[in-house]
Amino acid sequence: MTPTFEAADGMHGAIVRATKPADSMDIPVVAQGEASCCGVSACCTPTEQAVEPGVTVIEAKSAAGCGCQ
């Protein structure tokens, strides 16, 4: 963190630089199967259901960025 200026009494501006932890590369990426490409099974069909219990189809598709909402 690099302090830059005093914006107001007791309030300072700063430049904050973030880095990605080196061990973050070790986190495995879980690939979803074709049947659950966007958090739902049978996407875009009358029988589609959310894969996660307690999550609606709309919530699952929004979280996954599904383009066929």
Image (cartoon, rainbow, N blue to C red):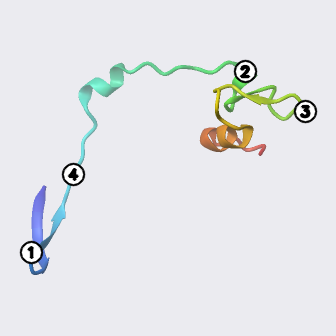
- Sequence-first disc among 3 and 2: 2
Amino acid of disc 3: Pro
Q: Is residue 33 above or below residue 18?
A: above
**What element does badge 2 sit on?**
helix
Real-space Cα distance between discs 2 and 1? 54 Å
Residue 16 pos. (x, y %): 20, 56
Query: Which residue is at the front of the view, 43 or 25?
Result: 43
Q: Are marks 4 and 2 in contact (CB under 8 Å)?
A: no
Real-space Cα distance between discs 3 and 4? 48 Å
Query: Which residue is at the front of the view, 45 or 56?
Result: 56
- Sequence-first disc among 4 and 1: 1
**What residue is rendered at 81% in x and 26% in y?**
42
**What residue is rendered at 69% in x and 40% in y?**
61
**What residue is rendered at 82% in x and 30% in y?**
48
Real-space Cα distance between discs 3 and 1? 59 Å
**Circle nearer the viewer, 3 or 4:** 3
Q: Is residue 60 above or below residue 14?
A: above
Q: In this figure, which residue is indicated by the disc labeled 1?
A: 10
**What element does badge 4 sit on?**
loop
Judge the density around disc 2: few (<14), some (14-19), many (≥20) Cα neighbours within 10 Å: few
Amino acid of disc 2: Glu
Mark identifier at residue 17:
4
Amino acid of disc 4: Arg
**What residue is rendered at 25% in x and 28% in y?**
22
Q: In this figure, which residue is indicated by the disc labeled 3?
A: 46
Q: Residue furthest front?
A: 54
Q: In this figure, which residue is indicated by the disc labeled 2?
A: 34
